[in-house]
Image: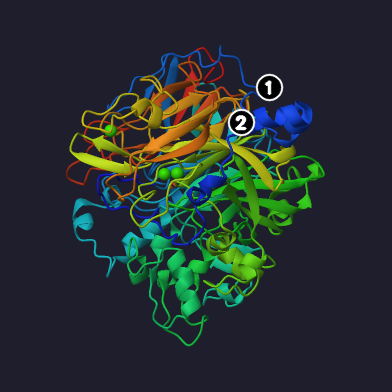
Amino acid sequence: MEKSNPQGKLLIGHDDCNHSKNESLEDILAQRLNRRDVMRLSAGFLGTAFFGSFMAGCNTEETTTSAVAATALLSFTPVAKNMNDAVTVATGYTSKTLYRVGDPIKLGVTDYLNDGTDTDFDSRSGDCHDGMKYFGLKSDNSGYEIANSTNGLMCINHEYINQNYLHTVAEVAAINNASRVPAQVDKEMSAHGVAIIKITNGGTGFALDKTSGYNRRITAATPINLQGVAAGSSYMITPYSTTGVMTRGTVNNCANGYTPWGTYLTCEENWNGYFKYSTTGRTAKEVVAFSRYGLGTNSRYGWESVYTQWMATVTGTDATADYRNAPNTFGYVVEIDPFNPTSTPVKHTAMGRFAHEGCWPAKVTVGKPVVFYMGDDSKGEYIYKFVSTQNWDAADATGGLTAGAKYLDSGTMYVAKFNVDGSGNWLKLDIAETAIADYTTYDFADAADVAIHSRIAADAMGATKMDRPEWGGVHPTTGEVYMTLTNNSNRAKSGSYGLDAANPRYYTDTYNTTTTNKGNVNGHIIRWKETGGEAAATTFTWDIYLFGAQSAVDAGGDDVNYQANINVSSLTADNDFSSPDGLWFSDVSKGLMWIQTDDGAYTDTTNCMLLAALPGSVNDGATTAITSKLVPTNGTADQTITTYVGAKPGTTKLKRFLVGPKDCEITGITETPDGKTIFVNVQHPGEDGTTTALTSHWPDGGTARPRSSTIVITKNDGGIVGI
Ligand code: FEO
Ligand code: CA
Ligand code: CA
Ligand code: CA
């Protein structure tokens, strides 16, 4: 996504649509237990064995069984922060560009001119590369081979577009959203979506194979099936599908996921901005629903001026006569079978509808449900999980979309509540829950209504408002779940929700000595351990693994107890960062976690980056009091929040591995099954430039327009990346 925008640029998405009255954890702070105190008191009465199991993971003195790799890992020298228009990777590693916006993915497509005149984006790389996943392909190209590290299919999200670089200078200057040029809209819709490309390493590094029949684009115009509880419901009826079982297109495909049965998951994030909406002719209930999802009267690109499918207004006699319901067909987890190039993608409605960042599986166990973790990336939104009705059968490991229907079309949705005592609850989103059935703000009609309006059901259940959930990941050995909370400029703002134990920081940061940003400016990473190690558990224990921060205080910044209250994780110049977004665990180097940034707060000092981390486990750190200087923002006194902070990483367990080019976001990371190659996406380099005043020429150099690209990183000695 475009940078998080502390400097006043137009920000699309991430706006706070959550005005529910959920109890803030701050409101029940008086209930707080100091877990160390509880342990100390209780041990004397109950014995540590009993109480230790009862409070599993809650005490900082607990002996953990974490399988964290030895500190010999992360043997590379950290990369210094910089603002170069280049990819800077750790010494001993090489970075090469593999796949740039506009690159042909089929034979017979002309090379990209990159001057705004190119067309044929159905046969080229889309724009703004984001989440991605490598799937091994048999050497004879006949199907899925999970362990193949030299031949693979890469699924890549193309989240949105940079109009400045997609069209000519004159065309950009003439863009009028009220009356778009059809050919330009076609180009923009085709530059969205997902790409599946075959890549092969014949010994000299990976290259795209333009001859492969697997190569295809899924765009904002591709037919997609609707499946699960809301498919075929009245909410989904459109002129395109009068039975409500199909829609066209997927947009704003941000992060991703994958399934244990060999398919790709792409997630629809800020889809609301693509529709032009009006309250005219709507029921009061519809107005509540569309408002909660941030629909607005002006669309992002004006596509509705050419195609009515983006015009979410009531103009006809019923839903078969206009696209009033079209927004209900967006906001889902979308499943794609990369190995079946003629298959139709599927939107899984049972996994809820919100600004889906990504969808990350827990490890599967035969005979137990399949579990996925998901975040809703907007300010003050929630963390969810889906638990399948069907139990995992290893025979489905290559089951493709048939297995997808089996596991993802029926299940239970939960939303997370983070309690002040370090425990957590997964609250069921079900029409049978009294809080949902009796919710006065919105009169839920049925299970389809709950699935389509996850946010409202989560409001009713009293979920915890988070600081913009971005990527998540499951530690491959401990099973603990990590999720980035990238930043939040609304937290503790006047009239907004307050601080709580899981979102405990508010402070002032300066940018270029001229601007100040307030809130949780640099973000943090939360993690949790499911009770009993069961992914489907309904309770958990949590702490905050890591806080983003500058290692050094700004001149003129908030320097009162800076290290204690802002740089809580004691970051150093070798690993300080802001706005964690991407987060991903290597499956090869067990315990190696990568953190990627999408920042607009520390970019006066450094471009966005990739860091490598060796996290421990929940509650390996200390109960910590953080004081926020709320005065004079909302007129209340300074506030101290007690929270649970993971062991500080020091200089050995968190290191900066890469810094990207100017104005970019670092995102989308995946590896070959041998861990010797990682792929990283560089999104929107030169985003702050214009057609006539470029701020970046990466990756082509000279006077070229900047291009979002996938890069390939290998270790020069042929070893496993990162260790
Ligand atoms: Fe598309 Fe949440 O970043
Ligand atoms: Ca982002
Ligand atoms: Ca600063
Ligand atoms: Ca993101």
Residue 145 image point, x, y percent: 69, 35
Residue 576 image point, x, y percent: 38, 26
Q: Residue at x 35, y 24 (%)?
A: 551
593 up-or-down from 690: above or below: above
Q: Residue at x 60, y 70 (%)?
A: 449
Q: Amino acid at mark 2?
A: Asp
Residue where numbered disc 1 is placed:
63
Q: Quadrant of residue 353?
A: bottom right
Extreme bottom residue here? 317
Q: Residue at x 53, y 50 (%)?
A: 28
Q: Is mark 2 within 8 Å of ligand 3?
A: no
Q: Quadrant of residue 188?
A: bottom left
Element at label 2: helix
Q: Residues within 10 Å of mark 2 (few under 14, many from 20)?
A: few
Residue 459 image point, x, y percent: 54, 61
Q: Nearer the viewer, mark 1 or mark 2?
A: 2
